[in-house]
């Protein structure tokens, strides 16, 4: 059965290491008939949450006029959400965290989704990368019925292209195929 897969790539560089892992996941997921969309967050205007409480106190849509509402709507419609980030100081990129914060208005509608996490880092140690994954899991802890399906650790890749030839590229493709 075909699924709607939404890939959120928060790399600041198209073709960067985490973005390449997204592309492999995308190709794997499409190869078995899934409908896949990748959003490159750098190309979108996503403002910071201002804490105005319009969404939480007054049950109204966020008053900000940017791309966040459209992306969150796609998250609500998706069956599978892939969240990908380069690792900066053992945590996710600001682009990804900003999007997560903007989910506040509709986070209760992001329910019963399958989630995959993709990270790329210069670090060679998977245990050190768990801090980044814990940030993603904190987001999932706020949602209804999320299922974490997999994590791709693109370790040992700092400069653009260093992910090439790493086992994580094959893992990303295979994980995408098995959505």
Image: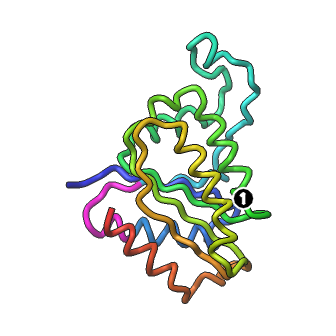
Residue at 66% across, 37% down? 101
Image spot of residue 78 (x, y percent):
39, 44
**Would residue 166 appear left or right of 158 to someone viewing this image?**
left
Q: Which residues are magenta?
A: 28-36
Tell me which corner region of the image, top left, top right, bottom left or bottom right, holds residue 28: bottom left
Image spot of residue 97 (x, y percent):
68, 47
| Badge 1 density bin: few <14, some 14–19, many ≥20, Cα 10 Å | many
- Residue lying farthest front? 127
Q: Is residue 29 above or below residue 8?
A: below
- Residue lying farthest bottom? 165
Q: Which residue is mark 1?
A: 91
Residue at 57% across, 14% down? 60
Image spot of residue 143 (x, y percent):
49, 37
The answer to whether residue 6 shows anywhere in this view is no
- Residue lying farthest left? 1
Q: Quadrant of the N terminus?
A: bottom left
Colouring rule applied to residues:
rainbow
- Residue lying farthest right? 89
């Amino acid at each position: 059965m075909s699924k709607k897969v939404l890939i959120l790539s928060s790399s600041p560089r198209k073709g960067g290491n985490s973005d390449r892992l997204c592309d492999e996941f995308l190709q794997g997921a499409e190869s078995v008939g899934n409908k896949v969309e990748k959003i490159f967050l750098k190309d979108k205007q996503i403002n910071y949450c201002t804490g105005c409480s319009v969404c939480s106190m007054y049950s109204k849509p966020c008053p900000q006029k940017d791309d966040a509402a459209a992306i969150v709507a796609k998250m609500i419609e998706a069956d599978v959400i892939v969240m990908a980030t380069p690792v900066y100081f053992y945590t996710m990129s600001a682009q990804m965290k900003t999007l997560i914060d903007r989910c506040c208005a509709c986070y209760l509608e992001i329910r019963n989704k399958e989630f995959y996490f993709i990270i790329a880092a210069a670090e060679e140690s998977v245990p050190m990368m768990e801090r980044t994954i814990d940030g993603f899991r904190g987001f999932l802890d706020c949602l209804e019925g999320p299922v974490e399906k997999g994590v791709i650790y693109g370790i040992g890749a700092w400069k653009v292209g260093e992910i090439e030839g790493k086992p994580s590229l094959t893992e990303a493709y295979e994980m995408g195929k098995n959505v």
